Image (cartoon, rainbow, N blue to C red):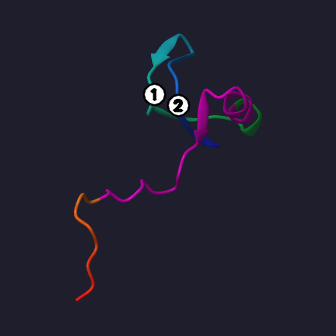
C-alpha cells in the first residue's frame, strides 16, 4: 500500500519528512495510518486550487 507521511518518521534508518511517500506491506501501512503518522496516498495528486472564484457566464 502506498502511504503519504503526515509527520516525520524514520524508515529503514532513513529520516522521512511529511509529504514523503512509501510503498509498504498493508499491515505496516495500516499501523502507521492508525498511529496518525501517515495517510493512504492518493492515486493522483489533488488538483491545484485557484484563488479566483468560479464564475459562470
Q: Residue at x 61, y 26 (%)?
A: 37
- Residue 22 vs 16, above or below: the answer is below
Q: Is residue 49 left or right of residue 45?
A: left
The quadrant in which residue 1 appears is top right
On screen, residue 17 above or below 3: above
Residue segment shown in magenta: 29-49
What kind of element bears circle 1?
loop
Q: Which mark is residue 18?
A: 1
Position of the C terminus, as image quadrant, is bottom left
Residue 56 is labelled as none
Q: Is residue 3 magenta?
A: no
Which of the 4 image quadrants contains residue 18?
A: top left
Callout count:
2
Residue at x 50%, y 19% (from the top left corner): 8
In depth, the one of 56 and 44 nearer the eye is 56
Tag 2, which secondary structure?
Answer: strand
Residue at the image position 26 percent from the left and 67 percent from the top: 53
Residue under numbered circle 2: 5
| CB contact under 8 Å: marks 1 and 2 | yes
The answer to if 36 sits in the magenta stretch is yes
Please determine whether, in this image, residue 39 is positioned above or below residue 56: above
Q: Is residue 9 left or right of residue 35?
A: left
- Judge the density around disc 2: few (<14), some (14-19), many (≥20) Cα neighbours within 10 Å: many
Can you name the residue that lies furthest to the top here?
Answer: 13
Q: Position of residue 27 (x, y in %)?
A: 77, 34
In the rendered structure, which disc, 1 or 2, sits on the residue that comes first in sequence? 2
Q: CA distance from mark 1 to mark 2?
A: 5 Å
Judging depth in this view, the residue of 19 and 25 nearest the camera is: 19
Q: Position of residue 43 (x, y in %)?
A: 52, 56
Amino acid at each position: 500500500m502506498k502511504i503519504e507521511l503526515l509527520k516525520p518518521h524514520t524508515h529503514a534508518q532513513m529520516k522521512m519528512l511529511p509529504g514523503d511517500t512509501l510503498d509498504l506491506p498493508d499491515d505496516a501501512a495500516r499501523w502507521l495510518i492508525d498511529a496518525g503518522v501517515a495517510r493512504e496516498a492518493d492515486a493522483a495528486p489533488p488538483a491545484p486550487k485557484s484563488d479566483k472564484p468560479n464564475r459562470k457566464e
